[in-house]
Image (cartoon, grey):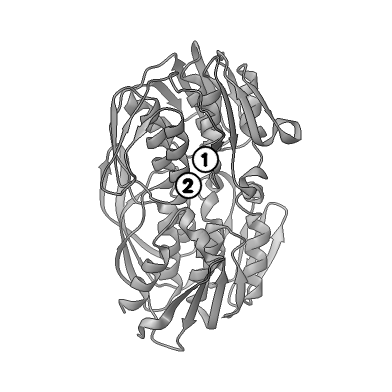
Amino acid sequence: MPSSIVNVRITESQQQLTIDRPNQGLSVQGRIRVPGDKSISHRALMLGAIAKGETTIEGLLLGEDPRSTARCFQALGAEISPLNEQRVRVRGVGVGELIEPTDILDAGNSGTTMRLMLGILASHPDRFFTVTGDKSLRSRPMSRVVQPLQQMGAQIWGRNGNSLAPLAIQGQSLRPIHYHSPIASAQVKSCILLAALMAQGTTTITEPAVSRDHSERMLKAFGAEITTDPDTKSVMITGPAQLQGQSVIVPGDISSAAFWIVAAAIVPDSDLTIENVGINPTRTGILEALEMMDADIQLENERIVAGEPVADIRVRHSQLKGCTIGGDIIPRLIDEIPILAVAAIFASGQTVISEAAELRVKESDRLAVTATVLNQMGAKITELPDGLEITGGTPLTGTDVESYDDHRIAMSLAIAALNASGTTTIHHAEAAAISYPDFTATLRQVCEEC
């Protein structure tokens, strides 16, 4: 296998990732590790910043989104050591003790940073905060967290009826509520839970389906009084609370692992193991969906690390088949739908993904963009109001495609290119650094092991 299979061309204004697929001999092989879980990384930094004492974090994701979180909470008074994968130390100020910053807080491209931080900031009486983000984040809806916070007594102002950043927050003493969320969203749930840390009494959040539960697990580990009721899909937290610094070990991100899982599943003769991946049951929808498609996936060395289930994931190539994906599984694979669409292209028959309208308000309109860019490569994808209909079995041909500055689109295109004839060039592929700074290096590794 020539080492030039993956070529990266960088100019001053953009990065282009070019993948030249050979006519034969390509497979995906070896053992790799993926970056730390992005959701857990954000929460470890935030809870460490508002806890008393020191929090140590091992395996932190070094992508741009967690860096945005770290910068914001440093501006709010927390002491955070330089970010690295080995160990990050956070000396927190205590719940309710963040300082009023002298400048606007910038969440960059990170919706998690902005939405979760709003809950914390809104509960700080007599302090004023302003938050913004990049062009993409300023267009993403914040009303889904602003409205429940307003029910708790928060004062928040912003563009478009207080639904778009920049947002101004005048901290208040908040009251507990029982919020029936219209969507299953870990960001909405987590925002309210963080706001409730300073509310007197019990706050309850009920969802239509259970979203990822990293906040609940970590809040409990830091000392919050929190309970869950799976039967009613509800979470209860009692405030006011004090949190104590903890030692956090961040497992590999299953959302990052998903790209390599699909790569090994669709590229002939592949056999790949991804080590140390978090398999929290609220995040494993991608594994369940691929198993429905007859993917050959095995979990090895299953264990619990710092309260989170972890395993090594071995994937071998198999002939996939189409299936229907919707309902309660969608919140557990919402970020993986673009790469799941790539898998469906190489499955026999038709795959239908529904109830995924949430993807229209991510870093891009991921339903429209996924259909557009993969169809440019020869796929047969029909965009639905709330999903995608993919007819499998159509060969892909390399071409010039655009990432739309969306990290998951950029990486999904790279995996699709491994099974496309000719040369694929992905423009603005540097977006991958949002969640996976070493994506291109790992792409080289798995392609050159064979």
Q: Nearer the viewer, residue 163 or 237?
A: 163
Q: Residues within 10 Å of mark 2 (few under 14, many from 20)?
A: many
Q: Nearer the viewer, residue 77 or 349?
A: 77
Q: Residues within 10 Å of mark 1 (few under 14, many from 20)?
A: many
- Cα–Cα span, label 1 and label 2: 8 Å
In the current view of this chain or complex, which residue is farthest to the front? 102
Residue 54 lies, in percent from the top left, at 28, 29
Name which residue type carries label 2: Asp
Q: Is residue 198 above or below residue 57?
A: above
Q: Residue at x 50, y 31 (%)?
A: 190
Residue 147, quarter of picture: top right
Q: Secondary structure at mark 1?
A: helix
Residue 327 lies, in percent from the top left, at 59, 46
Q: Which mark is residue 103?
A: none
Residue 214, quarter of picture: top left
Q: Secondary structure at mark 2?
A: helix
In the current view of this chain or complex, which residue is farthest to the top? 200
Residue 212 lies, in percent from the top left, at 47, 40
**Pointer 1 and pointer 2: residues touching (CB < 8 Å)?**
yes
Residue 97 lies, in percent from the top left, at 43, 19
Q: Nearer the viewer, residue 146 or 312?
A: 146
Mark with earlier residue (1, 2): 2
Q: Which mark is residue 112?
A: 1
Q: Residue at x 47, y 60 (%)?
A: 290
Quadrant in which the C terminus is drawn: bottom left
**Is residue 436 left or right of 341 when viewed as pictured?**
left
Name which residue type carries label 1: Thr
Kindly tell me whether residue 420 is visible in this rendering.
yes
Residue highlighted by disc 2: 65
In the current view of this chain or complex, which residue is farthest to the bottom? 23
Q: Residue at x 38, y 29 (%)?
A: 78
| Discs 1/2, front | 2
